[in-house]
Amino acid sequence: MNASNPPNLSILNSQIPGAAAHLASSKTRIRLILTIALVMVAATLGCSADGEPTPYDREDFTPIAGPPPLPMIFEGKFTVAGEPGPADQTIYAEFVHGGSLRSTTLEGEYIQVILGPVSVDDIDLGVISFYLGTRAGDHVKADQTWTWSQVNQPTNQVLDLSFPRFPES
């Protein structure tokens, strides 16, 4: 058998009872398997878009027991679309539940973005994200993040940040 001469199902059926039905059901199963595989691939690709991650439930809050951990104090240079950032912009940082107050930038620099974890999720997930803009308005996430580690005293950390664009006004 080759691709140019497909099997004659009537001959198969006359020689081997049920052969044509078996061949047809095999083709149907293969088509079904391929269809399921394509749907699974499409679903996987559709779910792995590069958009914003699913936000955490900020209402599901388990506070840290005992005294709060000491904060980190971030500062550094910042750029927007590859250029040094202008003065009088707002930068802030967030965990899942804990967040810094807003900090106003200097020309090409930000200073005193201060935060520490306030919930069990903040410590367990431990990733700090930085934003240009305001929580209530448009904000742009920095390309950089910081992984939290426990400190024994308030600690200054230099971290240069780059933002892909300015927030919409």
Image (cartoon, rainbow, N blue to C red):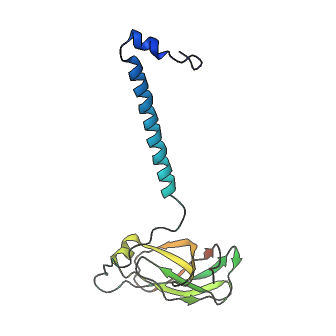
* Farthest left residue in view: 65
Residue 96 horizontal side relative to residue 167, left or right: left
Residue 83's spot in the image, x, y percent?
71, 77
Question: Which image quadrant is residue 58 in?
Answer: bottom left
Q: Nearer the viewer, residue 44 or 131?
A: 44
Image quarter of the C terminus: bottom right
Residue 51's spot in the image, x, y percent?
54, 65
Q: Which of 146 and 55 is in front in this view?
A: 55
Residue 13 horizontal side relative to residue 132, left or right: left
Question: Which image quadrant is residue 134 in?
Answer: bottom right
* Farthest right residue in view: 83
Residue in the picture at 44% in, 72% down: 55
Q: How many marks?
A: 0
- Image height of 53 relative to 13, above or below: below
Residue 126's spot in the image, x, y percent?
42, 72
Residue in the picture at 44% in, 32% down: 30
Q: Which of 52 and 62 is in front in this view?
A: 52
Q: Nearer the viewer, residue 126 or 46?
A: 46
